Each structure stands twice: as C-alpha cells, then as structure tokens.
Amino acid sequence: MRDILPDLRARCSDGVPFALATVVAVHGSAPRDPGAVLAVDAAGTVVGSVSGGCVEGDVYEVAREVLAGAGPRVVSYGISDDEAFGVGLTCGGMIEILVRAYATAAEREDLAAVLDLVAADLPVAEATVLSGAAETGARLVVRPALAPGSPGTPGTPGTLGSEGLDAAVTDDARGLLAQGHTGIQWYGAHGQRRMQEVAVFVRTYAPPPRMLVFGAIDHAAATARIGSFLGYRVTVCDARPAFATRERFPVADEVVCAWPHAYLEATEVDARAVICVLTHDPKFDVPLLAAALRTPAAYIGVMGSRRTHHDRLARLRAAGVDEAHLARLASPVGLDLGARTPEETAVSIAAEIIQHRWGGTGRPLGELSGAIHHPGGPTGTR
C-alpha cells in the first residue's frame, strides 16, 4: 500500500472512483505478499501491482467489472487452474485477491481516513470480510487500544455485521498490529473462536521499522541509503558534531549528535528495529553494545575485523555481558559477498538483515531446490 499511497490519497481527495485489488493470501511461491495492492480508476488508469505482472491483466478486467457495480469479489489464481495458467501465473503458487470498489464519496472518505493515518506513520488495522456468513467486503477499521486514563478514544469505524464479530476481530487486529502481521483470521458468525464460518482479512499498517546506524562514516551513509530504500525509518547517530550533519546524511530521517549509548538508552527500540554499529571504536562500542543487547531489536550488526570482534567480545564479557546476549551479535557484520566499497558493504549488511528477517540460507538460489519464498512470517522481527 505504501508504494502507491500518494496515488490513492489523490484519487480520494479528487473524488475519482476506483477499484482496489488486494492480495489477501499466498500459497506456495508468489511474487507479492498479502497486502500488495493494485488500483484501477474509472478512466482505466492502473497503479500498483499484485503479482509482478503475472495476473495483472485479468485482475484489471475484474476490477473494471467491480467498479461498474458487480460487487466485491475474491478471485484466486494458481498453477493448477487452467484459467490462471492462461493469464500467466507460472511461478508455481496460488494467490487470492480481494477486489472491491470505492465508488461513492462516503467509501472514499472512509478509506482516506485510513490512508491519512498510514501517511502519518500512525498504527491502524483494516479488517475486511472475505467470505462466509457475513457480507463480503464489510469493513472495520481498528486503532490500538489507549492506555488506561488516556484522553479520547481510538474508535473502530465500520462494522462486519455483528457486535460479537466486531469485538473479536478488534481484539485480534490489535494483537496483529502490535506484531506487524497481516493475514486471514477465521470466526463464527458472531465472533466465536475456533470456527470457520467467516473469513476476515486483517491488513495492518504499523509505522516503518527503525534502522539505527551508529558511526557517521562513509559506510554509514551507504547503509542509510539502502535502509531507506528497504523501507526503514533511518537514524544516524555520532558523538562528533563535525561528522553528524544533515549534509552528510541527506537520506536519513534524522541525524543525531550524541553519545551513542546515551541516545540508544533514551530512544524507543522495538522488536522490528535493526541496529548497525559501524564505529569500531571501543570507547563507543562497548557501552553502546551493552545497551543494544538490552533492547528487543531484531538485528544487531557490528563492523570490524575478526581481531576487533574477538577483542570486543572480551571487553563486553569484562563489562558483565553474558554469552547468551553476545550470541545475538552479527559480527563481523554482513554476508560474505566479497564487498569492498562502502556501497557494496551496505548491500552485504542489508542482505544479512533480510536473511535474518525471513530465515533465508544466504546461499545462491541456483544451488537450492524447493520454494524460493520462505513460508510464514519474519523470524524474530515482529
């Protein structure tokens, strides 16, 4: 959704009717994950993608039909279906796609409210009925619960058809939102657990995960660029004011001049965050890594030679860090790509972050067999 967010917001604000196709389930190998979207407006203009090109032509036709008044539909494409093979899904998997229209001003206003929250990096979840006893396309918007005593209310606009179903989905959607997970949940007609009567797709929009880069060096500039490209909210931190400048790191979301460990201890770090320590200076590294290992960060990568790594481990042990925590360090940082330049090193670091997130092997795909895309969600990140 974020990749076409400006286009969708423009269509809502300009009053342009459109149909939105959303990947709601993936089975086996498929090019896009649940949550990927494609929009088709009344003029036939297309933005986004649901399959990287495999089934876009057929989805386009379905979207035009839905926009013309056919009603919401869930369509499936898979290699076992003759029709799907005909439209080009030859990658061996199956995808399910919800297609619904935002034809009226009220529908676009409801969607625009969600898009505004996404654009502001505020967490929100959107639950949509796919099939079963409830009406296909029924929609419920869920915000995180407020802390006790907080003013106001997050609200849950919309309904899925029954008070019990709304309550159950709201509870589950908040849990999924906290983890950053998107997927299909099953319920009874009135929200009963462990029943299969109603399929509800819960799409979560969590704020972008953070990438914290410590050490304002050339490698940090390259790492910040690739972190931004991967969708992280990037912070670069260094204690030296001559180096920690906006001019040196124009792509970073923020540049902080502070002692690294002090900044890390004072900022929010969740289980989706990644930390890249590129300082390789003991007076910075040891207190910084001791602080980093107390966080739930998904990844902590540390630059330096193998000799520096062993010296660093000894210093951390002397500082009281135990072996279980030390085992979390990715050091020396990055995968073995033969990298030399700062840009190549940044690719190596990004590759290791991706490998850690999805549980990949790091080996060439040509040497492996089986599914290219690993099943399930991220490992240790959400």
Image (cartoon, helix red, strand yellow):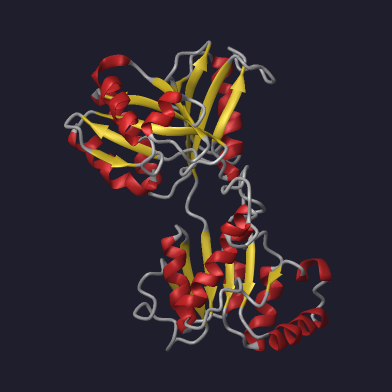
- Can you tell which quarter of the image residue 186 is in? top right
Q: Residue at x 57, y 80 (%)?
A: 278
Q: Is residue 268 visible?
A: no
For the residue pair 68 and 280, the one nearer the viewer reads as 68
Residue 29, how many percent across, how many down? 54, 41
User: Relative to residue 178, is residue 70 depicted above or below?
Assistant: above
Q: Is residue 78 left or right of residue 147?
A: left
Q: Is residue 115 above or below residue 171?
A: below
The answer to whether residue 131 is left or right of residue 38 is right
Report whether residue 131 is seen. Answer: yes
Q: Does 22 sit left or right of 275 as displayed?
A: left
Q: Position of residue 155 (x, y in %)?
A: 47, 30
Give 60 or 377, whichever is nearer the viewer.
60
**Spot occupied by residue 288 in the image (x, y as percentages of width and height):** 65, 77
Whether 260 is drawn above or below 68: the answer is below
Q: How many marks?
A: 0
Percent position (x, y) of residue 284?
63, 84
Residue 166 position by quadrant: top right
**Residue at 53 percent of width and 79 percent of height:** 339
Name the residue at 43% across, 22% down: 74
Quadrant including the N terminus:
top left
Q: Nearer the viewer, residue 165 or 27?
A: 27
Query: At 46% across and 38% down in the image, what residue appears?
Result: 90
Task: Give the image quarter of residue 225.
Answer: bottom left
Q: Is residue 122 positioned above or below 345 on the image?
A: above
